[in-house]
Image (spheres, helix red, strand yellow):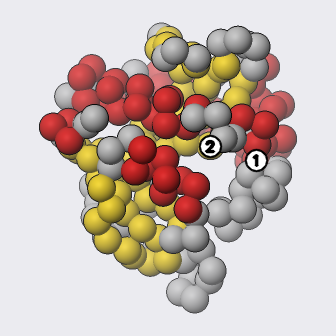
Amino acid sequence: MEYQTERLILRLWKQSDREPFAAMNASPEVMRYFPNTRTREESDNMVNAVEQILADKGWGLWAVEEKSSGAFIGFVGLNIPGYELPFSPVIEIGWRLDKPFWGKGYAPEAARKALEIGFNQYAMDEIVAFTALENQPSQRVMEKIGMRRCEEFDHPALKQGQPLCRHVLYRITKNQML
């Protein structure tokens, strides 16, 4: 299973993705809006879980490859959060790209494709996204792909008062898609 945009390929994960993914997850800059960085083992465990979800559902968090270079640049895709949120149950869209690929419009390009897959191929009614209130770059991506800001909430997996605890929720339906 593979999906293409003008400049990107959303695909299943390869063994060769694991090392750059682990390096990305260990980067304090890439992970600045997350509570902590990830070890190689934690990163590999995430890939294992993502691969299983993709195999079971047909959709999930796809590895993203830059067409021109063949480089693994991160992931984009759809996910069911593994914890109860104030607005559960939901399907969320998420992304994480490595720093050399920031500022090129790759996140919105791949995210639009993920929305299209969710709405058209899997008949999803609504897709949400959420991030730490401080994470302005991800909020800009959410707005570029046509999502609408709805509310703020405290993330249940983070302690009240932690800098990243306050989150913002965005939503989009198939009819609202640009």
Quadrant of the image for the C terminus?
top left
Say which mark, if any, is on residue 110: none
Name which residue type carries label 2.
Arg
Which residue in the structure is indicated by mark 2?
96
Whether residue 153 is situated above or below residue 149 in the rendered picture: below
Which numbered circle lies on residue 25?
Answer: 1
Q: Earlier in the sequence, mark 2 or mark 1?
A: 1
x, y percent for residue 151: 32, 71
**Residue 121, percent across and down?**
27, 20
**Secondary structure type for disc 1:** helix
Is residue 104 visible in this depiction of the protein? Answer: yes
User: 60 or 65, which lies in front?
Assistant: 65
Residue neighbourhood size for the residue with mark 1, other residues' Cα within 10 Å, grouped as few (<14), some (14–19), many (≥20): many
Question: Image height check: is 27 above or below 35?
Answer: above
Position in image of residue 9 (x %, y %): 57, 16
Q: Residue at x 81, y 58 (%)?
A: 28
Q: Amino acid at mark 1?
A: Asn
**Given contact means CB atoms under 8 Å apart, are the residues at marks 2 and 1 in contact?**
yes
Q: What residue is shown at x 76% (from left), y 43% (from top)?
A: 99
